[in-house]
Image (tube, helix red, strand yellow):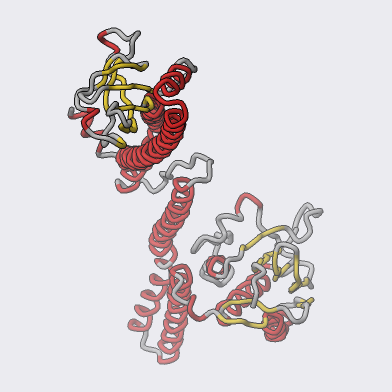
């Protein structure tokens, strides 16, 4: 009993029981309705057939008298599937006919019997007395009573047949419900149990767990895929938070130490010029720290999606052209050539400030790392349409980034320049990737010239999805 109630707590079992009950009620109602209508139709046909017999017998009596009536009844009584024919006296005693006896009181009234009555055939045994019939009784001129009736076995057999069909249908339905529950319901319950187990591990802190996906594409799979996507996002944010905490402790320790040392130098020195120099260094270090924290705040805002409401149609071609024009003098000052190939009329749905900041970061990184020991060097800025989206790429001819390290460079504070000889915070590509995720795009890193053994360069591509603007 306890196990029964435990199973009945399951939604699948309750739904199965509810559907079985609903189907049983509908099936029973339909069967009883069809049975009643069919029985009524058969009874009406029987009445019409009996009435025709009554008319024929009446005509035989009118034309042939008592002898004609007896001959007619005898002939009709011998036919296959004959009706009931009885001639009885005024007191109800059977004088002739093809019936051995009838229920007492049948001959007390004339016309149609109000309710079906029982009768016994000549060949019946004691256990075969339960024959039911309806009849029309009329009185002759000499006072004799004539009964013309019809057995109700056919409607009764039809009613029994329909009830048996209902019972068989209910049995098959119950068996089918059990089979469906074992085949589908239990499988659904097992999937829910697996999802529950995974959820408990996730709540315990193991964010690497994922809800099971069966591959059928049903509601459970769609729910699991959505929750897994959410879990991947949460895990990524937590991992980013952990990395930020570690990297802040590591990367900000050095500038804070320098800041403290310069403040100490400013206090120790008595020379005005040295003190001014120390204070200027403190200001420069402070500005760098402010830029770092601003970049962190910007990445957090972008990843949290707090700037989604600021999305609007923007002309990407003009933004890229303005960025190229702005950075040409900076590139020339660094001994580099900045070229641009911009397809006109390209627009996207996005945030102008964030996209401009991402382009600035990419060009700034290219200028920092594209310097050639032999002099010269080129940075190529390109905007074009591709089958998979709109591609904005910045390519340099620097040392490039090894393929195995490209996933790391988009993490916060990660810098391949371990000596920290290049200025920067290690947040530039992190911001670009966050901007692309916000815009539904992707960030791709590849070699500019993969045929070279060294200095293959780096091409960073921002792929925007094609959306109606």
**Left or right of 317 on screen, residue 141:** left
Using the rendered view, name the quadrant where residue 389 is placed: bottom right
Using the rendered view, name the quadrant where residue 195 is placed: top left
Residue 171 showing in the rendered view: no
Q: Position of residue 171 (x, y in %)?
A: 37, 27
Q: Position of residue 453 (x, y in %)?
A: 78, 52
Using the rendered view, name the quadrant where residue 450 is placed: bottom right
Q: Is residue 352 above or below residue 420?
A: below
Q: Compare residues 192 and 287 and report the one nearer the observer.
A: 192
**Left or right of 464 on screen, residue 295:** left
Residue at the left extreme of this rendering: 2
Q: Is residue 448 above or below residue 329?
A: above
- Locate the N terminus by quadrant: top left
Residue at the bottom extreme of this rendering: 272
The residue shown at (68%, 73%) is 367
Q: Is residue 86 above or below residue 321?
A: above
- Locate the C terminus by quadrant: bottom right
Q: Position of residue 105 (x, y in %)?
A: 19, 27
**Left or right of 205 on screen, residue 377:** right
Instruction: Say how many tags the image has.
Output: 0
Q: Compare residues 386 and 1 and report the one nearer the observer.
A: 1
The residue shown at (60%, 53%) is 405
Residue 363 showing in the rendered view: yes
Q: Position of residue 258 (x, y in %)?
A: 42, 73
The residue shown at (31%, 44%) is 200
């Amino acid at each position: 009993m306890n196990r029964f109630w435990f199973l009945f707590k399951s939604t699948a079992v309750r739904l199965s029981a509810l559907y079985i009950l609903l189907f049983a009620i509908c099936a029973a109602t339909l069967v009883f309705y069809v049975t009643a209508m069919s029985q009524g139709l058969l009874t009406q046909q029987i009445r019409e057939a009996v009435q025709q017999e009554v008319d024929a017998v009446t005509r035989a009596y009118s034309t042939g008298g008592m002898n004609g009536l007896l001959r007619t009844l005898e002939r009709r009584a011998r036919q296959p599937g004959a009706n009931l024919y009885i001639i009885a006296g005024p007191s109800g005693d059977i004088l002739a006919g093809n019936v051995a006896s009838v229920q007492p009181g049948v001959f007390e009234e004339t016309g149609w019997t109000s309710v079906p009555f029982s009768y016994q055939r000549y060949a019946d045994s004691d256990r075969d007395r339960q024959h039911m019939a309806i009849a029309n009784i009329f009185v002759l001129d000499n006072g004799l009573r004539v009964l013309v009736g019809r057995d109700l076995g056919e409607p009764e057999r039809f009613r029994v047949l329909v009830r048996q069909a209902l019972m068989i249908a209910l049995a098959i339905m119950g068996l089918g419900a059990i089979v469906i529950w074992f085949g589908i319901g239990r499988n659904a319950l097992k999937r829910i149990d697996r999802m529950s187990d995974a959820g408990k591990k996730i709540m315990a802190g193991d964010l690497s767990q994922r809800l099971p996906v069966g591959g059928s594409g049903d509601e459970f799979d769609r729910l699991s895929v959505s929750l897994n996507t959410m879990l991947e996002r949460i895990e990524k944010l937590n991992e980013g938070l952990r990395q930020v905490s570690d990297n802040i402790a590591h990367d900000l320790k050095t500038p804070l130490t320098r800041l403290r040392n310069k403040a100490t130098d400013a206090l120790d020195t008595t020379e005005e010029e040295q003190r001014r120099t120390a204070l200027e260094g403190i200001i420069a270090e402070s500005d760098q720290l402010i830029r770092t924290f601003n970049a962190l705040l910007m990445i957090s805002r972008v990843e949290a999606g707090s700037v989604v409401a600021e999305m609007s149609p923007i002309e990407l071609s003009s933004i890229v052209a303005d960025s190229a024009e702005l950075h040409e003098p900076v590139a020339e000052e660094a001994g580099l050539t900045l070229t641009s190939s911009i397809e006109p009329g390209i627009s996207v749905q996005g945030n102008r400030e964030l996209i401009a900041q991402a382009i600035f970061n990419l060009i700034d990184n290219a200028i920092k790392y594209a310097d050639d020991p032999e002099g010269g060097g080129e940075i190529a800025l390109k905007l074009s349409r591709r089958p998979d989206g709109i591609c904005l790429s910045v390519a340099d001819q620097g040392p490039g980034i090894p393929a195995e390290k490209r996933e790391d460079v988009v993490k916060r504070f990660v810098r391949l320049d371990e000596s920290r000889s290049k200025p920067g915070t290690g947040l530039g590509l992190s911001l670009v990737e966050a901007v692309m995720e916000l815009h539904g795009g992707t960030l791709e890193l590849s070699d500019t010239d993969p045929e070279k053994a060294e200095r293959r360069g780096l091409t960073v591509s921002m792929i925007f999805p094609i959306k109606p603007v």
